Image: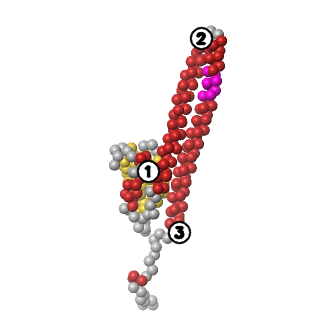
């Protein structure tokens, strides 16, 4: 036997919000944390390259000093076979260190010139209905994980993403989208590899 009667029509009943303010704040904080973690990781890589560069530069300076000493010794007297051999070894070592130093300098420049604009572009194409929960950027491979309130916002975001020169020549070989349980949102996972431009 009923003891309550609901006299309200269905349209007058309160609508429960699926994504409350607390959940939205948690999602925003997660995005900020992911971007901050990516920035820290890139800074650490650049610091390691700078440290290695300084170490190689120091070794190069020592070898150049030795080479100068050998040149002075050769200029003062007729070189012995052992001295000529030591000079040749030092000259070869200096050339190798110089090549390594040039390579490390290029790597350091690439890290600052390539990845920094990518992070700025990701911030520029930020959408209200899409959040990144993680991403990975490599020279010939990229991946993104995230949540979208509407499934159609993922292709729109991808269209904005491919406008950056860094992603030209990469094509998405894997796109997974799953419905979040008890939510209208979908989670997505994107994998891009170097290939024909789409």
Q: Residues within 10 Å of mark 1 (few under 14, many from 20)?
A: some
Q: Are marks 2 and 1 in contact (CB under 8 Å)?
A: no
How far is mark 2 from mark 1, CA to CA? 58 Å
**Residue that numbered label 2 is attached to:** 81
Q: Name the disc covering residue 143, or none.
A: 1
Q: Is residue 62 magenta?
A: yes
Observer-nearest of 194 and 76: 76
Image: magenta residue range: 60-67
User: What residue is at 55 percent from the left and 43 percent from the top?
Assistant: 45
Left or right of residue 51: residue 180:
left
User: What residue is at 48 percent from the left and 48 percent from the top?
Assistant: 117
Q: Name the disc covering residue 22, or none.
A: 3
**Is residue 37 something one can see in this rendering?**
yes
- Mark with earlier residue (2, 1): 2
Q: Is residue 90 magenta?
A: no
User: What residue is at 58 percent from the left and 39 percent from the top?
Assistant: 50
């Amino acid at each position: 036997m009923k003891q309550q009667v609901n006299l309200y029509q269905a349209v007058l009943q309160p609508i429960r919000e699926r994504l409350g303010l607390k959940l939205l704040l948690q999602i925003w904080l997660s995005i900020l944390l992911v971007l901050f973690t990516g920035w820290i990781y890139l800074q650490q890589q650049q610091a390691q390259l700078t440290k290695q560069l300084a170490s190689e530069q120091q070794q190069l300076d020592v070898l150049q000093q030795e080479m100068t000493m050998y040149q002075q010794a050769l200029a003062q007297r007729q070189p012995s076979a052992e001295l000529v051999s030591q000079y040749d070894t030092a000259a070869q070592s200096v050339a190798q260190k110089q090549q390594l130093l040039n390579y490390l300098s290029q790597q350091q420049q690439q890290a600052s010139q390539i990845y920094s604009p990518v992070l700025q572009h990701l911030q520029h194409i930020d959408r209200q209905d899409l959040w990144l929960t993680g991403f990975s950027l490599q020279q010939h491979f990229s991946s993104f994980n995230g949540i979208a309130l509407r499934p159609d916002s993922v292709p729109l975001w991808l269209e904005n993403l491919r406008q950056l020169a860094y992603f030209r020549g990469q094509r998405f070989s894997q796109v997974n989208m799953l419905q979040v349980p008890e939510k209208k949102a979908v989670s997505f996972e994107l994998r891009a590899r170097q290939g024909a431009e789409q």
